[in-house]
Image: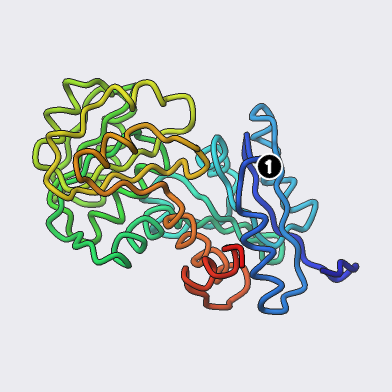
Amino acid sequence: MSVSGQTRLFGLVGHPVRHSLSPAMYNALFARYGVDAVYVAFDVDPRRAGAVASAIRTLDLVGVNLTVPFKERILPDLDHLTAAAAEAGAVNVVIQVDGALAGYNTDGEGLCNSLEAEGRHLPGCRAVLLGAGGTARAVASALLDRGAAHITLLNRSPARAEAAAAALASTFGAARLAVGPLEPAAFAQAAEGAHLVFNGLAGGAEAQVAALDPAPLAPNADWVDANYWMARPPQAERCAALGLRFHSGHAMLLHQGALAFELFTGQPVTADEIRALLEPR
């Protein structure tokens, strides 16, 4: 890869980010499609959240992905938001055009696209979402767009889950939503016959997630953990023992990456193409 004064700069902003596969993914795509660009990871102190939008403009970054804890904190500093980002109350992609910053959210579409690619039927599904931040809200919004029958948000702070449900209800008036604490009893009740569990909690909640019992889920239900970088994600072994389908989050990442790459460059790409680029030969 040759870098010149004309090379465009993209990146990932978050904390921590050193485990991320995004630089390898996007740089491989830039090379594959002959795009004169480079993608790097920026590990930013959360106390500097208020300076992120200014840094994007000052450094002339063409586009960035955002992860925790900046997905929500950057919202007041953006010039435009897509409907999906507004529904999620968070962004994970920011594009700069002539100094104006537009925020997008591909979390929900990435998750749903990854499940649909495996033949999952999302209309009418009952889902339990662990977490009530921007990622969980984006997933809830995308599921409701596809006709999910019922969604339960469980969070360490029930008040935040209630706020997320209220925001979703303002957009999806007919949605059947429930909230509760992130505790085994609440999960057992919500999981009875559910078709999907999505863990959108960041690292640090492993013990609480591991304390949940997936046994009440519907046969062949899906459990997706967004923390694709974990070597041994909680519930992977338990789901396998029960015959449930556990997803590490890699497929979600690839589908998000495909959506973001098209936003970055205008070049359509599929998750399968990205997978082929990243797999060792």
Residue at position x 58%, y 76% in the image: 266
**Residue 147, percent across and down?**
17, 59
Q: Which residue is mark 1?
A: 52
Task: Estimate the x, y position of residue 252 in percent, counting from the top left.
Answer: 42, 55
Give the quarter of the figure containing the C terminus. bottom right
The quadrant where residue 16 appears? top right
* Front residue (pair 121, 137): 121
Task: Determine whether, in the image, residue 168 is placed left or right of residue 64.
Answer: left
Q: Nearer the viewer, residue 264 or 19?
A: 19
Quarter of the view holding residue 45: top right
Circle count: 1
In the picture, measured across the screen, residue 7 lies left or right of residue 190, that is right
Question: Could you tell me which secondary element the residue under label 1 belongs to?
Answer: helix
- Left or right, residue 203 beside residue 247: right
Q: In the image, what residue type sits under mark 1?
A: Val
In which quarter of the view is residue 94 placed? bottom right
Residue at point 10% right, 36% down? 192
Image location (x, y in percent) of residue 133: 40, 36
Q: Residues within 10 Å of mark 1 (few under 14, many from 20)?
A: some
In the picture, which quadrant includes the N terminus?
bottom right
Q: Nearer the viewer, residue 51 or 214?
A: 214
Does 39 sit above or below residue 53? Answer: below
Of all residues shown, which one is farthest toward the right?
5
Residue 256 in the image: state x and y as whole percent.
47, 59
Q: Say how the picture is coloured.
A: rainbow
At x 66% / y 57%, what residue is drawn?
Answer: 24
* Residue positioned 71% across, 43% down in the render: 42
Horizontal side, residue 133 vs residue 164: left or right: right
